Structures are given as structure tokens and as C-alpha cells.
Amino acid sequence: MKTMTLLCLGIALLVVSGLLINTSRAEKGTSERLRHVVLFKFKADATPSQIDHLVKEFQKLPSRIPEIKEFEWGTDSSPEGKNKGFTHCFLVTFADEAGRDAYLPHPAHKEFVAQLRPLLEDVTVVDYWAKK
Amino acid sequence: MKTMTLLCLGIALLVVSGLLINTSRAEKGTSERLRHVVLFKFKADATPSQIDHLVKEFQKLPSRIPEIKEFEWGTDSSPEGKNKGFTHCFLVTFADEAGRDAYLPHPAHKEFVAQLRPLLEDVTVVDYWAKK
């Protein structure tokens, strides 16, 4: 009986410390994200299916480039009319500059850019360390 | 002895289901974020202390406008030279369009924009629903 009680306490302690570690990691993570914001404006003759294909190719990069820690994207729906023709936004997150610097010349990234370039009219890229 | 074993199993089950619920919540959260990306290019005669002040004013908005669910910002550090003069990026997150539509005409936001405008050379805004 005593052994089981100690075992239970031990398990509870492990679980609680595990949760605490996870929480502190998550909080730390938030303040240590290098964001890579990419805006695309496609050429007028780029077809919807070509654009779809490019988005799918971009979506494959996180599984090909382990330095990508988070990835999300979407199409502009701002009512403000200040998107300057940029219709697609991608938010790629790295742990640090080394991650970003591994991503930029990565063969999978270069392959994607080679497919993208003929259809792209304009691009804006801003990287920043996420602060609160 | 048997009771303690059952108790241990019960606790383990509760913990695991708790973790699963948390994970699914986090995943759901990610797919239900309306992002509002704002890029600023300041006028050449805007001083660093004026810019600092504006950033601090923007940082106050999450506590003034409850519709802002997440807020982060940073200054451009991209080595690619595609930032088009935009030096500051703000990522404001809403739960839905109603949140964004409450933010845009909110008195605290308008007050901030009134302070910002004389120092701003250019702005780009893109909103998107975050998809994976």
C-alpha cells in the first residue's frame, strides 16, 4: 500500500513537472521566434490552378526543411485597400537566424522559387524577432 | 492495493485526456486566427524617439481593445533586401472578422493612427485567415 502511494505521488510529480516544463517552453518559444513574412503579388496571366499549385509547393517546405518551426498562410481579406496588390501572405517561423540562413539557400526552397519566379509580379519580405 | 492501482490508472487516464483536449484546442486555435499584418515605413525625418513612442502606443492597444487576441511586432532583419523600405512589422490577431471590424474604427486605434500618420511614409496591410 505504501509503495503504491509513493508510486502515485511519483507519477503525479512527474506529470506536474512535465506540464511546467512544457508551459515554460511555450512561453519562451513565443519570445524567441524569428518570423519571415512573405507577400506575393502574382502576374495578371497567372491562372488560379498555377497559383494553387505554387501554394501547395510552398506548403510542402516545412516537411522538407526541418528548420521551419511553424508555417501558415492565407489570402488577403483586408477591407482597408492597403494590400498594394499583394494577395498571398506566408508566415514562416524559425528558431533563430541559423534556421533562416539554412532555409534561404536550401535546395527545396530554391526549387520552389524557380517554379514561383515566372508567375510572380512582386514580392515583399520582412523578417523580425517577435516581441510582445 | 487493487484500489490504489485503479486510482493510479484513473489519474493517468485523466492526465492523458487532459493533454489530448489541450492539444486539439491549440490546433483548432491555429486554424481560427484572423491575422492582420501591418508594415510601416517611416518618413526620413521621423526621429528614433518618435518611432519608439509610436511603437509603445501600438503596444498599448491590446489592453485597450479586447478584440485583439494576440499581438507581436519587430523590426526588419531580413538579409534579402526585399522589404521595400518597410522597417516595422506588426502582427495583430483577431478571433474573427467581427473582432477586426471592431478594431479598425475603435477610438483607441483611431487615436493611435492620428499620432502615426504625420510620421508615416508608407503602409502595407494584409489580413488573412491562418491556414497550415
Image (tube, coloured by chain):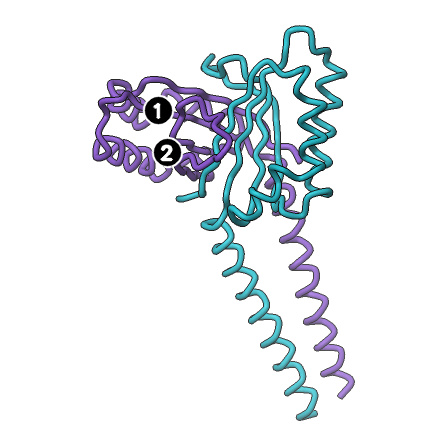
Chain colours: A cyan, B purple
- Is A101 left, or right, of B110 in this rendering? right
Q: Position of residue B94 (x, y in %)?
A: 49, 32
Out of B46 and B63, give the one closest to the viewer: B46
Q: Residues within 10 Å of mark 2 (few under 14, many from 20)?
A: some
Position of the N terminus of chain A, as image quadrant, is bottom right
Residue of label 2: B65
* Residue at x 38% of width, y 29% of height: B87
Q: Quadrant of residue B41?
A: top left
Q: Position of residue B70 (x, y in %)?
A: 46, 39
- Is B3 left, or right, of B99 in this rendering? right
Say what secondary structure mark 2 lies in: loop
Q: Amino acid at mark 1?
A: His
Q: Output the chain of dot 2.
A: B
Q: Position of residue B7 (x, y in %)?
A: 71, 77
Q: Amino acid at mark 2?
A: Ile
Q: CA distance from mark 2 to mark 1?
A: 8 Å
On residue B69, the disc is none
* Residue at x 66% of width, y 81% of height: A8
Q: Quadrant of residue B28?
A: top right
Residue of label 1: B106
Which residue, as the protein is rendered here, is positioned at the far bottom?
A: A2
Mark 2 vs 1: CB contact within 8 A = yes
Q: Position of residue A9 (x, y in %)?
A: 61, 81
Q: Output the chain of dot 1.
A: B
Position of the C terminus of chain A, as image quadrant, is top left
Out of B113 and B64, give the one closest to the viewer: B113
Which residue, as the protein is rendered here, is positioned at the far top?
A: A45
Say what secondary structure mark 1 lies in: loop
